[in-house]
Amino acid sequence: MSRGASGVVSLVVVAALAGAACGGRPPAPPPAALEVREITLGNAIGADKRVAMPMTAFGPRDTIYAAVATDGAPSTATLAARWTFLGGGQPSLLDSTAQTIAPAGPAVTEFHVSRSEGWPAGAYRVEIFVGERLVGTREFEVR
């Protein structure tokens, strides 16, 4: 056997022994962190939870959807949406909801708000959080 061949054989033996010492499996990589790729607003969503037609201006009787596209595969993560009315001088929190998700790659999570008495005209904002970390905002208006 040549010197080069015996070196390769030695590496293969060392790798095999190391694998056996670890139970025969390489260590599992840490779960991928959840990353928000896109936040889209609209007044309707499809079966895939995506907004049918993106928009930033809504009518007073609309249900307002936020489709949050994410990527990553954490064992679990908490996504939250906080909806705020910006008109009237002082911002006013309208609604806050959270969902625990366990995606295995790209996913879409849907949040929505509605008011039976209708939305007052003015400026609004939705903030999206992963855990306690703010990851994106979208401003919109009701006419």
Image (cartoon, helix red, strand yellow):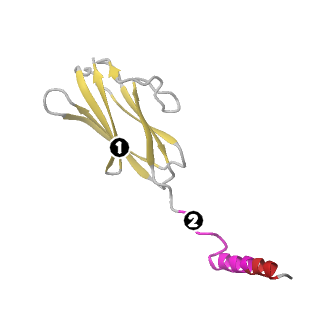
- Could you say whether the residue bearing mark 2 is in a helix, strand or loop? loop
* For residue 71, side relative to residue 81 (left or right): right
Residue range in magenta is: 11-29
Residue 53 coordinates in the image, percent (x, y) = 45, 22
Residue 40 coordinates in the image, percent (x, y) = 41, 31
Q: Observer-nearest residue: 70 or 7? A: 7
Q: With respect to residue 60, does 37 lie above or below?
A: below
Q: Quadrant of residue 88?
A: top left
Q: Earlier in the sequence, mark 1 or mark 2?
A: 2
Q: Is residue 7 magenta?
A: no
Query: Which residue corresponds to mark 2?
Result: 28
Which mark, by number, is residue 20? Answer: none
Residue in the picture at 74% in, 76% down:
12
Query: Which residue corresponds to mark 1?
Result: 80
Q: Observer-nearest residue: 112 or 89? A: 89
Amino acid under disc 2:
Ala
Residue in the picture at 45% in, 50% down:
34
Mark 2 residue crowding within 10 angstroms, few (<14) / some (14–19) / many (20+): few
